[in-house]
Image: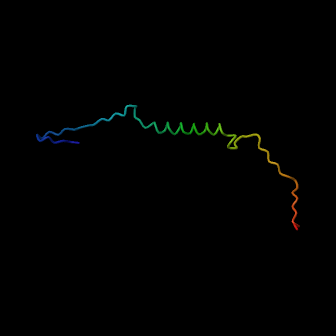
Amino acid sequence: MADNDGNGTEREHTTVVETGNGGGGGGGVLAVVVLIIVVLVLLYIFRADLGFGSHGTNISVPNKIDVNVNSG
């Protein structure tokens, strides 16, 4: 940006903005990684309640079902 102060001299003005942490922008990535880790830990803790990896799943199917269609 050039300013003309009336005497024919143009001056360049540069504004430097410092972020303070070496560039910034890494907070969002860190938040996503922490969120994924928390979700995985919670899934591991409650895996039995959700039905993942439980060894006690037994389904019993009878060999014969008696149905009476002659009612009354």
Q: How is the image coloured?
A: rainbow
Looking at the image, which is closer to me, 11 or 65? 65
Looking at the image, which is closer to me, 5 or 52? 52
Instruction: Name the spot of residue 39 as percent of width and height, x first.
Output: 59, 39
**Left or right of 26 on screen, residue 60:** right
Instruction: Name the spot of residue 45 as percent of width and height, x first.
Output: 65, 36
Name the quadrant containing residue 35: top right
Instruction: Name the spot of residue 48 as percent of width and height, x first.
Output: 70, 40
Q: Give the residue at x 67% y 43%.
A: 50
Q: Quadrant of the N terminus?
A: top left
Q: Give the residue at x 63% y 40%.
A: 43
Residue 63 lies, with reference to residue 6, above or below; the image says below
Name the quadrant containing residue 65: bottom right
Most extreme residue toward the left is: 7
Looking at the image, which is closer to me, 64 or 33? 64
Instruction: Name the spot of residue 28 as percent of width and height, x first.
Output: 47, 39
**Left or right of 57 on screen, residue 1:** left
Q: Quadrant of the C terminus?
A: bottom right
Q: Give the residue at x 22% y 38%.
A: 12
Report the number of discs. 0
